[in-house]
Amino acid sequence: MVAAPVRIADAATVRLLRAGDRVDVIAATDPSAGHAPLVLARDVRVTKVPEPQGDTVESGALVVLSAPRTTAARLVGASATTPLAVTLC
């Protein structure tokens, strides 16, 4: 397991999270192109919710997740290019 800092698009959702929570991480896709949202990780543990820095309304908010190395790489890579969301497990 490794720590993966991931930016979630909705900062208000991140404010609901606490260390120890478990979440599914979902990548938003373009519904007009016929793509359904994609689940990138299931039941990963929140390890830290850093204090917001700067304008979180526009840029979402950071959360640190504990995930297997390959899942962490997929999450971090996707968060650099795709809006991500979480659901609480």
Image: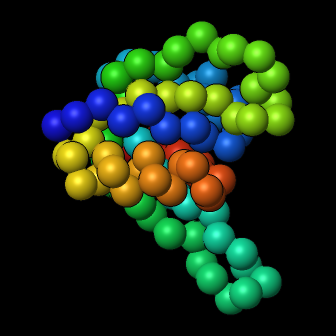
- Left or right for 28, reference 56: left
Which quarter of the rendered picture does the N terminus lie within? top left
Above or below residue 62? Residue 24 is: below
Q: Residue at x 44, y 46 (%)?
A: 76
- Left or right for 12, reference 8: right
Above or below residue 81? Residue 44 is: above
Q: Nearer the viewer, residue 52 or 42?
A: 52
- Left or right for 33, reference 70: right
Q: How is the image coloured?
A: rainbow
Q: Residue at x 82, y 30 (%)?
A: 57
Q: Residue at x 76, y 26 (%)?
A: 56
Q: Nearer the viewer, residue 82 or 26?
A: 82
Residue 36, given in percent of the width and then of the height, sits at: 60, 78
Residue 22, given in percent of the width and then of the height, sits at: 36, 36
Q: Residue at x 54, y 49 (%)?
A: 79
User: Extreme bottom residue here?
Assistant: 34
Which quarter of the rendered picture does the C terminus lie within? top left
Quarter occupied by residue 39: bottom left
Residue 8, given in percent of the width and then of the height, sits at: 60, 40
Residue 73, given in percent of the width and then of the height, sits at: 33, 51
Does the rendering let one see residue 52? yes
User: Extreme top residue here?
Assistant: 51
